[in-house]
């Protein structure tokens, strides 16, 4: 018997012993997740394939190329990006616009789903498609193959696309681009990266000869620089056959150009760039200590552990920086530090960033340098270390808990990073085990040593950017250098503070559940609580570690007089900054270490609400946060002054941006008869007249009656637990007999045939807004038709304004109807463009709308809308956020939530004449046009 007991003991201990041994040898290579199939064809093309049914009946296809703008010759600047555009303009199997047309017909939207990007070292194409039909998947592989090897580059199509690419180039013009062109040569000193921004150069885009683009495609779009990634609701064996069928036959060029990798040269001197611009909206500070050598790939257990140490280090340093931002008269709005990537492939740097007030750049820089020096000299405290470990383990645990709920797009991104950066491909189980094994072995001294290893006065670059205006003198280079020389003798160790143990400071008068009603169709349960509050709960299994929360009540700021509203408008969003339950923001951040729960309150014009989320493990904590926000919101004038300071720093120069100035002037004109419109952002005078006390008292008033609220929970909840926590934390909330209503004050924007042109800025760029709106008698059928009209017109505008006229990079139309607080419709068209084309493109856009009014949408375009709705509904209906939105919208619109289940039937029944009827009824007159243009040349 004794031997038997020993054998049983060994049997139970063996797995843990083996588990421990797996992590003892730090030189051991990290294992690749066995659920992904990785292969390399003879021609060098790498593929990754994985079966994943989240979302179901969908597959994410991706073509990844290890070639970007860094490989361009001087005559090809911008052509890597131009080539990306051409892949959507016609291939051997899909000539001209038939590729986009086909994908729209199966529910794939151009831009939203179908997309691509070009960077310095890579070009990536995204193709998520339905997998419910083998023919759709076959077509998807044909598209990937054609992108890779069979894109048609005719002179006609190249010349047409010049205009589209130039419009994308135009969008990027402005203060940020001008400032970047000045500081980039120092940021990427003596590096090719400083000369190869992916967007390229205007003159080259306009004038390059066709052979330059063709040669880039032939040189770099080749198998040994490519990866094909396939993840979704598919059979792995079948997908592997398709990869081989479509890609194995292609060969690399006989005399292929070597794929060079360009580094980031070091420099002994500290480089400083202070750049200002009249249109700059923000004031920033950036410090970079570049690593001397390439960053090695994460290959071994030792590398994994080293990365974990860096995460702990960054977490603790950033917690200190965040605390500084919550102090009275803070040195910056926000700041953070990290050791991470630069523009140069495989080269990293320790980097610090801060957004500051326009006159506090040197102060912010000094705080950053002092905190870096403090970490180097004294290290971190044991309490900081424990909180950082708790936080890192908490995130690892949440990721592990969601291991069977990950979306295909998450896996695709991981495989892309493996191909491009040689990043590890660990299973969630292995990662979680590694964290749990290594975390107890990490010593505080190891992390403290990192401060000395990472923060070195070498290869240093300091970049200061901000506004250029009268009365503001930017720092000089000598002043910046002086701040970098920190006198460490004046530094003292960081002083940590005590952490409270609970958010509930007083015993709770537990309430009761007085009624319970189940809706089997929706899968919801509605509780009535003893204080009159309602609680709707929908348990789901969409995610394992997510619970979403909302609480809504009618009322809002429309209950206030115009005078009172003006005093509290800007203060309402800052009430959270005081903290809850006697804890300020810094105390709360420490208290929440290792916990996953968040909650915010909001007071809108017609409702007040709370919204947040958590995981099952911290569900009770979220309920405590709800109780504390209702009953124990702190009143702290100093915290509010800090909030004002940060807000003013953030927004003080927004009007310098021409596009924002245009929005202010345009909407200010339309709203000039509305006494409650006090500008889009607060001025210094607005802040001076803001009454924090009155805002706080209004908050207390609106959240003093929980019986007037409807609470919602969606996610992985247990109803028995919900009932107990609801009795403790919701039913115990104070309540009154009265109930507020949703009020329409009757204020409306101007209407009629209006055209407002606003001139601001010097860059040759414009924006056009076309709007039609008004009051209606709400009808759900018309609302659906209005939505369809927006989607269909977007398709036609892309075809006409982008593809045919080459006049825009992006254009969209949107139609909607609202039921509350008053029934209304809203239809809009928006696009950026060149000033010289604004009038013509406006006419073209309205011409496309008038075609639908006169003839109705084509059956083909209506079917595209329907197919897209089916695809989106199928995916979104398996997400907690979707259900929360449907349930809360049903409450605020005072309609039955069961109606959502009829949505696809209503979509299928929608006819073209209904869309035409709505267009005729609402969109033939009262067209408001807003147009932003550059200032006239003086």
Image: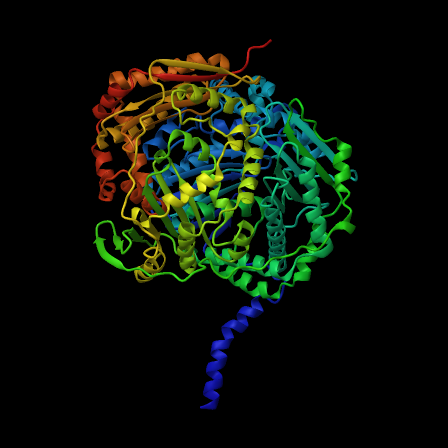
Closer to the camera in the image, 80 or 545 = 545
Residue 683 visible at all: no
Residue drawn at x 27%, y 56% is 530
Q: Where 901 sits versus 846, above or below?
A: below
In screen coordinates, is 639 left or right of 892? right
Q: Where 597 sits versus 888, above or below?
A: below
Residue drawn at x 68%, y 60% is 446
In screen coordinates, is 119 left or right of 133? right
Residue 40, percent across and down? Answer: 52, 47
Query: Which quadrant of the figure has residue 515?
Result: bottom left
Closer to the camera in the image, 264 or 314 = 314
Residue 104, percent across and down? Answer: 35, 31
Outermost residue toward the top? 938
Residue drawn at x 21%, y 53% is 520
Residue 43, percent across and down? Answer: 54, 42
Q: Where does the N terminus fall, quadrant-wise? A: bottom left
Query: Which quadrant of the figure has residue 698?
Result: top left
Q: Where 423 sits versus 763, above or below?
A: below
In this figure, what is the number of numbered marks? 0
Q: How is the image coloured?
A: rainbow
């Amino acid at each position: 018997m004794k031997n038997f007991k020993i054998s049983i003991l060994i049997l139970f201990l063996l797995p843990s012993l083996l588990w421990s041994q797996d992590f003892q040898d730090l030189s051991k290579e990290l294992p690749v997740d066995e659920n992904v199939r990785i292969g390399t064809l003879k021609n060098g093309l790498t593929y990754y394939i994985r079966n994943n049914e989240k979302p179901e009946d969908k597959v994410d296809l991706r073509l990844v190329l290890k070639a970007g703008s860094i490989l361009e010759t001087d005559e090809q600047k911008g052509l890597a990006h131009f080539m990306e555009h051409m892949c959507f303009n016609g291939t051997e199997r899909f000539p001209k616009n038939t590729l986009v047309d086909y994908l729209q017909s199966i529910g794939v939207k151009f831009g939203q789903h179908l997309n691509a990007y070009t960077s310095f070292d890579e070009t990536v194409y995204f193709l998520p498609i339905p997998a419910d039909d083998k023919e759709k998947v076959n077509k998807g592989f044909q598209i990937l193959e054609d992108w890779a090897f069979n894109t048609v580059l005719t002179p006609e199509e190249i010349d047409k696309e010049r205009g589209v690419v130039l419009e994308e180039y135009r969008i990027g013009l402005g203060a940020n681009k001008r400032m970047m062109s000045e500081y980039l040569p120092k940021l990427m000193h003596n590096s090719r990266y400083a000369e190869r921004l992916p967007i390229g150069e205007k003159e080259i885009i306009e004038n390059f000869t066709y052979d330059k683009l063709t040669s880039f495609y032939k040189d770099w779009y080749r198998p040994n620089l490519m990866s094909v990634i396939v993840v979704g609701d598919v059979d792995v064996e079948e997908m592997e056959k398709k990869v081989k069928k479509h890609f194995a036959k292609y060969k690399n060029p006989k005399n292929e150009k070597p794929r060079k990798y360009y580094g980031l040269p070091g420099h002994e001197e500290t480089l400083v760039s202070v750049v200002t611009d009249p249109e700059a909206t923000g004031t920033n500070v950036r410090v970079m200590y570049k690593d001397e050598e390439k960053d090695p790939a994460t290959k071994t257990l030792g590398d994994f552990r080293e990365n974990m140490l860096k995460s702990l280090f960054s977490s603790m340093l950033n917690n200190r920086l965040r605390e500084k931002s919550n102090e009275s008269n803070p040195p910056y709005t926000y700041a953070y530090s990290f050791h991470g990537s630069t523009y140069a492939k495989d080269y990293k740097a320790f980097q610090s960033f801060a957004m500051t007030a326009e006159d506090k750049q040197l102060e912010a820089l000094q705080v950053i340098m002092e905190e870096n020096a403090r970490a180097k000299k004294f290290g971190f405290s044991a309490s900081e270390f424990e909180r950082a470990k708790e936080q890192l383990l908490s995130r690892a645990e949440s990721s592990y808990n969601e291991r069977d709920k990950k979306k295909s797009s998450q896996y695709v991104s991981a495989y892309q990073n493996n191909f491009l950066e040689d990043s590890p491909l660990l299973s969630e189980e292995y990662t979680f085990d590694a964290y749990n094994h290594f975390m107890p072995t990490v010593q505080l001294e190891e992390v403290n040593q990192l401060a000395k290893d990472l923060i070195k006065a070498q290869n240093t670059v300091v970049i200061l950017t901000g506004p250029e205006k009268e009365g503001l003198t930017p720092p000089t280079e000598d002043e910046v250098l002086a701040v970098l020389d920190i006198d460490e003798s004046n530094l003292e160790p960081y002083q940590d503070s005590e952490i409270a143990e609970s958010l509930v400071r007083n015993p709770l008068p537990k309430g009761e559940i007085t009624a319970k009603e189940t809706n089997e169709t929706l899968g919801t349960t509605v509780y009535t609580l003893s204080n009159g509050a309602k609680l709707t709960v929908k348990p789901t299994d969409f995610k394992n570690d997510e619970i979403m929360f909302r609480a809504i009540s009618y009322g809002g700021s429309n209950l206030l007089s115009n005078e009172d509203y003006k005093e509290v408008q800007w203060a309402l969003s800052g009430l959270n900054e005081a903290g809850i339950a006697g804890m300020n923001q810094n105390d709360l951040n420490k208290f929440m270490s290792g916990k996953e729960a968040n909650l915010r309150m909001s007071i809108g014009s017609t409702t007040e609400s709370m919204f947040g989320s958590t995981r099952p493990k911290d569900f009770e904590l979220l309920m405590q946060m709800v109780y504390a926000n209702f009953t124990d919101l702190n009143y702290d004038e100093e915290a509010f002054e800090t909030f004002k300071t940060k807000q003013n720093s953030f927004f003080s120069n927004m009007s310098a941006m021409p596009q924002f100035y245009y929005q202010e002037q345009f909407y200010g004109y339309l709203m000039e008869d509305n006494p409650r419109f006090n500008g889009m952002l607060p001025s210094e005078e607005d802040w001076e007249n803001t009454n924090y006390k009155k805002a706080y008292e209004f908050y207390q008033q609106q959240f003093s009656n929980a019986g007037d609220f409807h609470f919602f929970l969606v996610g992985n909840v247990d109803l028995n637990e919900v009932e107990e926590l609801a009795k403790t934390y919701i039913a115990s909330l104070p309540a009154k007999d009265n109930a507020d209503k949703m009020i329409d004050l009757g204020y409306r924007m101007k209407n009629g045939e209006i055209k407002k042109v606003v001139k601001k800025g010097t860059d040759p760029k414009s924006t056009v807004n076309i709007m039609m709106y008004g009051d209606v008698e709400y009808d759900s059928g018309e609302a659906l038709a209005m939505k369809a009209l927006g989607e269909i017109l977007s398709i036609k505008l892309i075809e006409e304004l982008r593809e045919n006229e080459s006049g825009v990079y992006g254009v969209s139309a949107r139609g909607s109807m609202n039921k509350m607080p008053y029934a209304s419709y809203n239809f809009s068209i928006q696009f950026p463009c060149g000033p010289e084309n604004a009038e013509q493109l406006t006419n073209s856009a309205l011409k496309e709308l008038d075609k639908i009014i006169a003839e109705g949408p084509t059956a083909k375009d209506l079917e595209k809308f329907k197919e897209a709705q089916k695809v989106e509904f199928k995916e979104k209906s398996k997400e907690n956020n979707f259900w929360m939105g449907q349930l809360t919208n049903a409450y605020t619109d005072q309609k039955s939530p069961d109606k959502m289940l009829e949505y696809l039937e209503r979509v299928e029944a929608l006819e073209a004449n209904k869309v035409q009827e709505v267009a005729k009824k609402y969109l033939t007159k009262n067209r408001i046009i807003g147009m932003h243009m550059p200032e006239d040349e003086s």
